[in-house]
Amino acid sequence: MKSSIVPLTRTTLKVTGRIFKVLPMLLGVLLSTRVVRAQQAPDPADQDKQTIRMLLERVEQLEARVTQLEAARQGRPAVAPTLVTQQASTPAEPETETQAEQPSEPERMDLSKTLLRMRGFGDITLHGDNHKGDTTSFSLGQLNLFVTSDVSEKFKFLTEIVFEAGPDNAVGVDVERMLLEYSPSDYFNLAVGRYHTAIGYYNTAYHHSTWFQTTTGRPFLFDFEDKGGPLPIHNVGVSASGLIPSGRLGLHYVAEVGNGRTSRSPANEPVQNLVDENNHKAFNLAFFARPESVRGLQAGFSVYRDVLSPANLPRIGETILAAHAVFVRPKFEWLNEALVIRHAPFGLSHVFETPGFYTQLSKQFGSYRPYFRYQYMNESNREPVFPDIGLRHGPSVGLRYDASESVAVKLQYDYTLLRRQEAVNGLALQVGFTF
């Protein structure tokens, strides 16, 4: 076995000599400090400990320098004495000849400094209407936990965990959004996971919380899939977005590829979280502008394309064309969106087109914000994918009152005309809050 004694060299003797020269000086400083402190005040024990600790740290630094010089002379990496200090509390194992020749590796430490942030949103609504079969009820809205984390400088994570009651009164849990985002620059941002599709404006401006919305609910064009909405509101896949160099015009792009929406059976989960029903992927491309000359203005369009595979029917090509022009400022908003859903069954010449639009206007006066919305949608009764929507249109008027920075009270009246059915009059009182 090789000896562990380091031979004395000129370098070692030189540094060792420095140590012995410094030690008397350090001891002298210690003694003089004690004498001065004795003249001024009694010595606190913690001050003595601090002085001794400083002396020991200085000695360890000198010893580390000796070790580094010897290692450099012998052509091998040095083992810092501080590692011995950190591991001194662990019982040592018998050292073999191979271990004696190998320098110890420092333990890996998790230096991650991610910060988890959480916001909560919820609402409770009392609503009723004259539609046959409906009852006046208190309803728990979505309890939304919005969680974000800065994984690193360029990676971020967000998710929306929603607790919601269904028609059977049972409360279920859904992960409505779950995204890992990579943002190297303003011109390119990449996100993977479950996201809200960039069809039009409303779907990416307002997520799973009525708190941010002026009205008690979403336009029925943008109703969630499990509420009977006609659009693929959610998707699982990849989304890229960013600025387009355009000066003061403020052009942006969004490109998305995902599983799309299921079409085999209305009883299936609408969002294909795990398995796609076919090999074809849904694709959405959107462009919009935010000109600097008109603060609050945004205008754009999007094109969505997918292939659906409903049971006992031929495959259907789905195309959704959407356009929007909105003007939003803190105390004023004017939202306008229009779209067309086109379903073209393979092998048939007939194309089913469903047009729809809405316009919404509101103005804030102090804590009060009156609003108006008119919406329209006309779907053919022979529509092969979603035949239960039909024709519906009508106005909504309401008032939002911000009781505090975290609580809003809304009162809304809806009048909806339906095809071959009696018009529906509805009234809703809602309390929305954030915490």
Image: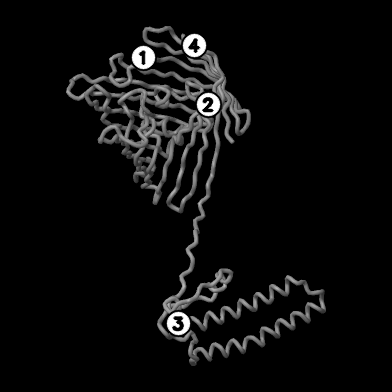
- Whether residue 300 appears in this view of the structure is yes
For the residues labelled 2 and 1, the Cα–Cα distance comes to 26 Å
- Numbered circle sitting on residue 391: 1
Residue 122 location, quadrant: top right
Question: The residue under label 1 is which amino acid type?
Answer: Leu
Question: The residue under label 3 is which amino acid type?
Answer: Ala
**In x, y percent, where is residue 213?**
50, 28
For the residues labelled 4 and 3, the Cα–Cα distance comes to 87 Å
> Of circles 2 and 1, which is in front?
2
143 sits to left or right of 220: right
> Of circles 4 and 3, which is in front?
3
Question: The residue under label 2 is which amino acid type?
Answer: Gly
Mark 1 residue crowding within 10 angstroms, few (<14) / some (14–19) / many (20+): some
- Of the image marks 1 and 3, the number of the one nearer the N terminus: 3
- Of the image marks 4 and 3, the number of the one nearer the N terminus: 3
| Residue wearing tag 2 | 141
Query: What residue is drawn where x is 47% and y is 13%?
Result: 415
- Whether residue 213 appears in this view of the structure is no
For the residues labelled 1 and 4, the Cα–Cα distance comes to 16 Å
- Of the image marks 2 and 4, the number of the one nearer the N terminus: 2
For the residues labelled 1 and 3, the Cα–Cα distance comes to 84 Å
Secondary element type, mark 2: loop
| Residue wearing tag 4 | 425
> The N terminus is located in which quarter?
bottom left
| Residue wearing tag 3 | 71
